[in-house]
Image (cartoon, grey):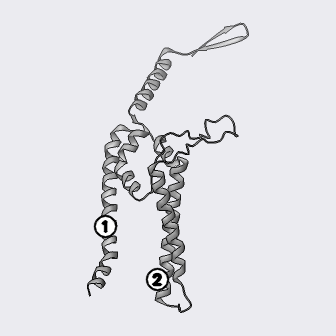
Amino acid sequence: MEEVEHGDIVVTERPSDVASEEIMTSTTDVEEQSQLADGDAILKCFSPLLNSMKVFGLYFTQASRHIHDVFTSTSDTTESRVCKKWNKGRIYAMVILVVFWLNAFSMCREFNKADKFGVLLFMKLSAICATFNSAFQQTACFIACQTGNLDRVFSDVRLPKSDAVRYRRFAVIHTVVCWIFLLADLSLFLFPFFIVGST
């Protein structure tokens, strides 16, 4: 580095090789940014899983919304403006949420005075805990979709485009495995009803 004095001011000049390294670094950063997949690409990767979540009312999107970003906001008094328009996905998710909570509260009526300490009481307690757990999970997914936090998570993700195919494959595998477990569980649940009904 070469220092040149101009009166009271000292100017330091950099050699050209250091400046060229900084230019190379910045062009490399730009190339890396162009190779990253945006949030919409991530949503497309996870579309099999998200579409399956829509079936159970666990995921919905809102057509137009402006989500408040705390990091870019200049004033603390700015409120988030989320479009309150009701679309089919939101209505469906709300109906499913209400059904889950009605089911959870109706399970509380399973207790009666004849209950004694034993296996049946523990089975009732575990069924009630599982029902309330399902209702809380459904509520958490509804709130995450309603506030836009779930979409924000996907839109903030920046992955290399080469990984998009791999994540798409993982999403398809997880979706297939979840559907297999769901159908197996449903068949084990419904099988005794068909046996009892036929006898």
Q: How would you rate the neighbour count of disc 2 (Cα within 10 Å): few for under 14, some for 14-19, many for 20 or more?
A: few
Q: Is residue 132 above or below residue 34?
A: below
| Residue 180 to residue 106: above or below | above
Which residue is tagged 2?
123
- Mark 2–mark 1 Cα distance, whole angstroms, equals 23 Å
Which comes sooner in the sequence, label 2 or label 1? Answer: 2
Does residue 120 appear in the picture of this structure?
Answer: yes
Q: Amino acid at mark 2?
A: Met
- Which quarter of the picture shows residue 184? bottom left
Q: Is residue 159 visible?
A: no
Residue that badge 1 annotates: 183
Where is residue 173 shown, x and y percent of the image?
Answer: 30, 55
Q: Residue at x 46, y 83 (%)?
A: 123
**Is residue 192 left or right of 72 when viewed as pictured?**
left
42 relative to 89, above or below: above
Answer with left or right where residue 171 lies relative to residue 18: left
x, y percent for residue 42: 40, 43
Looking at the image, residue 178 sits to the left or right of residue 106; the answer is: left
Image quarter of the C terminus: bottom left
Residue 195 image offset from top left, x and y in percent: 28, 83
Mark 1: secondary structure: helix
